[in-house]
Image (cartoon, helix red, strand yellow):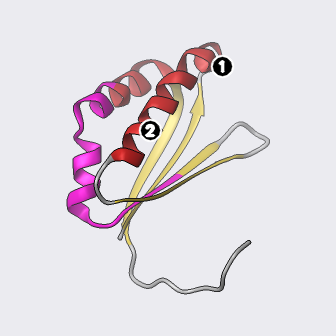
């Protein structure tokens, strides 16, 4: 499994414009082959963390390279994000108990 951790802070003046694009990208990711899960967290200081999982590097890369996602990435870099950091990780082990 491939996990992408995306940390960012939005430019305050573009938050309303960002929301529908982010929703469209989530819908697109969920429709991609190999999609596993998505979680979104926000800290009180404005930092946001998104965690997205795909079953393989190939399915992750198909999502990364999707033309609509590439457009959204460009908008993010040029307009929406005050700062961001992306980590793409390969899961080495996974274990746990059921969470409710």
Tag nearer the camera, 2 or 1: 2
Secondary structure category for the residue under label 2: helix
Residue at image x 29%, y 46%? 63
Disc number for residue 63: none
Which label is found at residue 12?
A: 1
| Quarter of the picture holding the N terminus | bottom left
Percent position (x, y) of residue 58? 20, 60
Left or right: residue 33 compared with residue 78: left
Residue placed most toward the observer, 88 or 85: 88
23 is higher (above) or lower (below) than 39: above
Q: Disc 2 and disc 1: Cα gap in Å?
A: 24 Å
Q: Which residues are magenta?
A: 51-71
Most common SS among magenta residues: helix
Q: Give the x, y percent position of residue 19.
A: 57, 25
Name the spot of residue 51 as percent of width and height, x first: 51, 55
Q: Earlier in the sequence, mark 2 or mark 1?
A: 1
Element type where label 1 sits in the image: helix
Q: Which residue is mark 2?
A: 27
- Is residue 57 part of the magenta span, yes or no? yes
Question: In the figure, is residue 39 to the left or right of 41?
Answer: left
Above or below for 95 versus 11: below
| Residue 96 appears left or right of 1 | right
Q: Residue at x 66, y 19 (%)?
A: 12
**72 in the magenta segment:** no
Q: Quadrant of residue 69?
A: top left
């Amino acid at each position: 499994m491939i996990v992408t951790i995306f940390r960012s802070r939005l430019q305050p003046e573009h938050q309303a414009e960002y929301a529908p694009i982010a929703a469209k990208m989530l819908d697109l990711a969920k429709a991609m082959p190999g999609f596993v899960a998505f979680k979104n967290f926000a800290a009180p200081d404005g930092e946001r963390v998104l965690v997205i999982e795909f079953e393989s590097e190939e399915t992750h890369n198909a999502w990364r390279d999707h033309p609509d996602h590439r457009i959204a990435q460009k908008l993010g870099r040029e307009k929406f994000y005050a700062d961001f950091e992306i980590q793409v990780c390969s899961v080495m082990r996974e274990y746990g108990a059921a969470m409710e």
